[in-house]
Image: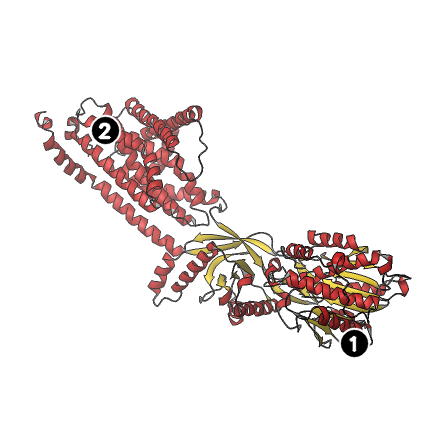
Amino acid sequence: MTFFHFGNCVALAYVPYVIVYKCSGLAEYSAFWKCVQAGGAYLFTQLCKMLLLATFFPTTEAVAGSLDITGEFLKSTVDIIDLIGLHIVMSKFAGKGQLKFMIAGMGWATAELIVTRFIPLWMGARGVEFDWKYIQMSFDSNISLIHHISVAMLVWLYSRSDLQKTSLPIVLTLLGLACYRPLIVEILMQAVGLGSWMLLLAKAGFTSVVALISLQMYLSIPSQGTNSYY
Amino acid sequence: MWFDELGEVFEMFKGSFPLSFLFFIPIFIIISPVSPVNAAQEFAVYRMQQYDLQGSTFGCKNAIINMEARSIDSKMLTRRCAVAKLQDVTMPKYRDLMTQNAGALLVILPSNLTSLSPEEKQHLQSLEQELMHEQSTVPVYFALESEYLQDIYVDVQEGNSGDNAPTAWEALLSSASANGFQLMVSGSQAEAMPDFEIANIQGRLSGYGIEEQLPTIAIVAHYDAKGVAPALSFGADSNGSGMIMLLELARLFSKLYTNSRTHAKYNLVFLLSGGGKFNYQGSKRWIEDNFEAAEGNILNDVAFVLCLDSLGSSDNLNLHVSKPPRDDSAGGQFYKHLNEVSKSHFPEVKVGMVHKKINLGDEMLAWEHERYSIKRMLAFTLSHLDTHKTFDRSSITDKRETVSPQVISRNTHLLAEALARQIYNLTSQGTFQMFTDTLSVEDNVVEAWLNYLANEPRAAQVLKSDSEVVLTLEQTMGQYLKDVRKTLLKADKRDPEFVFYTGAEYQMNAYNVKPAVFDLFLALCIAGYLALAYFFAQNFHVIYYALKRSVIPVSPKTKVN
């Protein structure tokens, strides 16, 4: 398609990030450089993950089209490192309590967006052939922004000592769900045969539910009740 | 410190977003790669004939296209590629395309050309002739129907509704929702091949006695085929069947001629001529060469020249002559022998004689024997066709399935018997059959040859003089005959009689594209979505407080604190 189409895709993918950055109060705290640092931490974590995958996990010669559940499960298990990485980011970089996870989530998601989405968009959306998948990819990046912020929030909640004991299992379950999200998506795709648009919708629904539950738990933490960043 | 400087650079772009956008866009456009191509569908297309013959130009000139696909019925076809099925294409529509200055025409042929109904076949054949007869600048491509092409066709047909919408708004809407295709044929433009060489393959069996004093019978068949698209011209009947008969006759008579008791007092000359579909260029040059040759002229004392063309189906055998031979001449005797053999051994075959005078005013000769008749040799063509006006001899419908190997074997047998009677002068032998047992026509050899020859396109421009088919034919002739020679003929440099062009088969890419209006629509939708997201983010505190209010009563601790 045209450069215009590429512009459309980029706008759809990136402008929500800018909006969230501007409106969440990160701009006022000039947390830009911290976000960049969080992004750097993302890159380092991915490197560690790749090393681990390449060293310890055998490549399975799966036939194309079939689902290799064990392989996918192992890969998703490695994603726990992401959570550790997020935790380190939040504990190392100074910042006001609730800003911490916003910075970590934002930086993390932006780094992922730049690293994994920009090149495919650049190569694909400018090709002659039109395909809906680039628009879908851009939507997907919006979803993953919410996903990363809520995961950062959950990690932050887990590290809090004043979290209600009853909420702890919920936090762990949600973290597990977030971690194995790619696997669940894969299974859904194989079992139900969801189309790409339905899959996107399912992802959006799933992510917003996780985000709402974590937001509610965050609000139930006593110290947060009074001083919001708004 | 570098850190501060970097911060300043960031600060520059942070402050003014639109300005930085303007700063980056030219850079993006400059460094953007040259349209990377992926996920496109690729299929083979066969270009229409293009050749110059005797000073006139035929077929389509161009080859490279890169344009939008449109239905052939749509109103606007300028600089666009019309896509149509065979039944949609008619000559008036084709002429309309020309006047509209259309970019190209892609004709989707049924995947099985032999299963056409008689009407469809006739439509295709007459279309072929008319297309080939005209010169055009519009590239015409043929493709065999496939599932993907069918999808393109349906989408293109639907896109057509946009052109015929009653209001401008509806037209805009339908063009935004339409699924367009960009068709692209890349590669090198079709070029003339000035050094193209046509090969004639000749071989001979010398008779018993002093060679120069014996009469000669020449058996001639051209080996090329013709159809509207060179890469689809298989020519099983014309002239695969004639070639096979010639090769089989060469084999049978070589057996007879190696035995001194059956060594006849006739020289036999076999010629596989090239360029037969282009006014019999091969025969023409062969005659000229032989007349010019100072010595060893094989055409010195010719009893008759027998041309074979289209002998692979039906029970008719027609001897086409330019001038009816006298009964006592060699030709008259041969015709009598043919009649007798068919009566006594092949009662189902109807042998006839068709007389057609040579029209010297015509640019194209009707049959190959006319080349020899012009030079005052006794010549005739044997064919199952009863007129030269039929389109069967130059059509892409002439495929393996239309020809029966049994008929070819039978015709070969009949012809061999008749020839044997001629050269051994067996007038009083009655129902005697010569070609039986070890001398019989081998059915499986005939079938194998037919499968081989009808398996790949044999258009003259595809068959270079060193192509596999030509080499195989030369080798086979060499097994049976003596003095087998491949003579090459080239068109004259200054005033070429024929010019062939490259580019018979191309790969066409079809890209699924959307019109520019669609991008505009998409941009509007995205702007709407982003505005919604902005509104949501601005008013996030509403949700925030609503949630907080629902949470706080549940946790009484907060109040205690």
Mark 1 lies on residue:
B325
Q: Depth check: A62 or B118 in front?
A: B118
- Dot label at residue B42: none
- The answer to whether residue B497 is seen in the rendering is no
Q: Is residue B110 left or right of residue B166?
A: right
10 Å neighbourhood of mark 1: few (<14), some, or many (≥20)?
some
Please state the chain letter of the residue tagged with numbered disc 2 in the rendered image: A
Q: SS class of the residue under badge 1?
A: loop
Q: Quadrant of the N terminus of chain B?
A: top left
Q: Quadrant of the C terminus of chain B?
A: top left
Q: Depth check: A204 or B167 in front?
A: A204
At label 1, which amino acid type do we have?
A: Pro
Q: Residue at x 63, y 62 (%)?
A: B404
Residue A187, image x and y in percent? 34, 38
Mark 2 lies on residue:
A171
Residue B472, image x and y in percent? 72, 52
Q: Is residue B460 left or right of residue B21?
A: right
Q: Depth check: B374 or A115 in front?
A: B374
